[in-house]
Image (cartoon, helix red, strand yellow):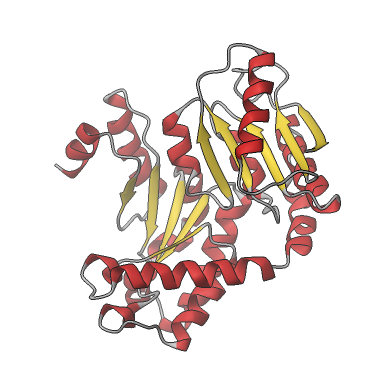
């Protein structure tokens, strides 16, 4: 019933609870595709049994959720923080997004301010490399839902500039494949860091280029320009990606003009800043990212 409702309403994501094996994800995907839909699936890692099948589960899904509430019941409590790090790291290496959830600001269900331990918990999740941190009861039934969101946002905005970006970029070099789009994406992140650019901009039909760039954890925002609203919604959950929906590119010149316009409108840059651009020479070709250029506004 839940799946039918989600398909009818054309939801942006399906989150599958109590995943044990990759076949759980595959079964749901077959149902979705049988209805002519392509909706991303988030595997909620709640069962201890899922840990031994973690690689295949991540491969089969579009992203994972570290659902620490039920995982903390299933697994020895002293392992939960280590499992969180393991899940996030594996997802990052495989280019899948990760969400860290459950009891992040639990005290704010009843109080308008968090505990120091909760602030540290969110900070550690961000340092672990999670793409997103998620509130549950704090906003579903808590007394201070808006305050909880504001607190979480303030923590993230304070922590993110302090992350060891150079170390992470260097470490991720080992994860670069021989595929041209993968190498170009990594090169763009490295160039952005080395030249102290303010923004990375990519035009993407499928979202794959923006996802590749995000995987290498650049220290600057990623402006993803796409003609597909569904792609924009998917990209919004990835680390550092700010999607913008535009009309479909007619040709290369049209793509260049749209990219230029959206870059100048971006709040992340000002006149004189360096911008790194990644795209394909021929617009509309999936997996065709083969162009990197650096320009000063």
Q: Residue at x 82, y 46 (%)?
A: 191
Q: Residue at x 59, y 48 (%)?
A: 94
* Residue 274 versus residue 89 in the image, above or below: above
Residue 158: tell me if it is visible: yes
Q: Looking at the rendering, in which quadrant would you find the N terminus?
A: top left
Residue 57 placement (x, y as % from top left): 45, 50
Residue 104 placement (x, y as % from top left): 40, 74
Q: Residue at the top extreme?
A: 250
In the rendered structure, the answer to whether residue 244 lies left or right of residue 186 reads left
Residue 150 placement (x, y as % from top left): 41, 69
Q: In front: 177, or 198? A: 198
Q: In front: 41, or 270? A: 270
* Residue 249 versus residue 262 in the image, above or below: above
Residue 83: tell me if it is visible: no
Total label count? 0
Q: Looking at the rendering, in which quadrant would you find the C terminus?
A: top right
In the rendered structure, the answer to whether residue 268 lies left or right of residue 60 reads right
Residue 233 placement (x, y as % from top left): 43, 39
Q: Residue at x 26, y 70 (%)?
A: 137
* Residue 45 versus residue 24 in the image, above or below: below
In the rendered structure, the answer to whether residue 253 lies left or right of residue 58 reads right
In the rendered structure, the answer to whether residue 295 lies left or right of residue 112 reads right
Q: Residue at the bottom extreme?
A: 116
Q: Residue at x 46, y 27 (%)?
A: 228
Image-quadrant location for residue 67: bottom left
Q: In front: 266, or 213? A: 266
Q: Residue at the right extreme?
A: 195
């Amino acid at each position: 019933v839940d799946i039918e409702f989600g398909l009818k309403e054309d939801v942006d994501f399906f989150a599958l609870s109590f995943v044990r094996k990759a076949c759980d994800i595959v079964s749901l995907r077959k149902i979705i595709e049988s209805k002519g839909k392509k909706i991303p699936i988030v595997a909620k890692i709640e069962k201890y049994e899922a840990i031994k099948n973690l690689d295949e589960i991540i491969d089969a899904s579009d992203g994972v959720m570290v659902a620490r509430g039920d995982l903390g019941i299933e697994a020895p409590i002293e392992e939960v923080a280590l499992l969180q790090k393991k899940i996030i790291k594996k997802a990052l290496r495989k280019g899948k997004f990760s969400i860290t959830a459950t009891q992040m600001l639990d005290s704010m269900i009843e109080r308008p301010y968090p505990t120091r331990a909760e602030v540290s918990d969110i900070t550690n999740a961000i340092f672990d490399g999670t793409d997103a941190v998620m509130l549950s009861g704090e906003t579903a039934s808590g007394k201070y839902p808006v305050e909880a969101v504001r607190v979480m946002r303030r923590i993230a905005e304070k922590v993110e500039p302090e992350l060891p970006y150079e170390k992470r970029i260097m470490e991720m070099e080992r994860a670069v494949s021989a595929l041209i789009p993968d190498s170009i994406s990594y090169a763009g992140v490295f160039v952005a860091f080395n030249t102290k650019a303010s923004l990375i901009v990519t035009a993407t039909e499928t979202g794959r280029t923006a996802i590749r760039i995000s995987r290498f954890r650049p220290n600057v925002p990623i402006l993803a320009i796409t003609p597909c609203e569904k792609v924009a919604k998917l990209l919004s959950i990835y680390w550092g990606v700010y999607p913008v929906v535009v009309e479909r590119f007619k040709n290369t010149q049209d793509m260049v003009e749209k990219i230029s316009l959206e870059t100048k409108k971006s709040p992340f840059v000002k006149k004189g800043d360096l911008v790194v651009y990644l795209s394909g020479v021929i617009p509309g070709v999936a997996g065709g990212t083969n162009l990197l250029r650096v320009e000063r506004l």
